[in-house]
Structures are given as C-alpha cells and as structure tokens.
Amino acid sequence: MKIIQGLKDTFKYLFTGVAKIFQPSDDNYPETGVQPFEGEPYEESEQNY
C-alpha cells in the first residue's frame, strides 16, 4: 500500500509541475502605455579615445 501511495504522490508532483509549465501566463502587469523621456540626450564629444 505504501508503494502505491508513493507512486500516486510522485505522479501528482510531476503532473502539477508539468501543468504549471504549460498553463497560460498569469502575469498581471499594469498597462503603462508610452512613458515620456526624462533623461538628458546623448551629446557626442570631440575627444578620440
């Protein structure tokens, strides 16, 4: 009986892992849209490195 229960637990563990991999994404990111640029534009220097 313990062998059968152990096999059931093993298959359940493996199946839940596989199901989690192949289920649809549950990401709930907020819709942010386009963000304005708040930095300084790049200015190329005249120095040669």
Image (cartoon, rainbow, N blue to C red):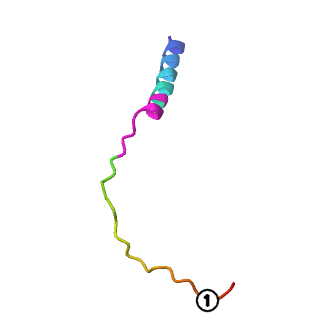
Of residues 31 and 7, which is closer to you in this image?
Answer: 31
List the residue tagged with mark 1.
Answer: 46
Of residues 30 and 40, which is closer to you in this image?
Answer: 40
Left or right of 6 on screen, residue 31:
left
Q: Is residue 33 above or below residue 24?
A: below
Residue 27 picture location, percent across and down: 37, 45
Give the residues in magenta: 18-27
Residue lying at the far top in this picture: please name it.
Answer: 1
Residue 12 picture location, percent across and down: 46, 23
For badge 1, the amino acid type reads Glu
Residue 4 picture location, percent across and down: 51, 13
Left or right of 44 on screen, residue 22:
left
Report the residue at 49% width, 29% height from top.
18
Of residues 25 and 18, which is closer to you in this image?
Answer: 25
Of residues 8 and 26, which is closer to you in this image?
Answer: 26
- Residue 25 falls within the magenta-colored stretch: yes
Left or right of 9 on screen, residue 46:
right
Residue 40 picture location, percent across and down: 44, 80
Report the residue at 30% width, 54% height from top.
31
Density class for disc 1 (Cα within 10 Å; few <14, some 14-19, many ≥20) is few
* SS at circle 1: loop
Quadrant, the C terminus:
bottom right
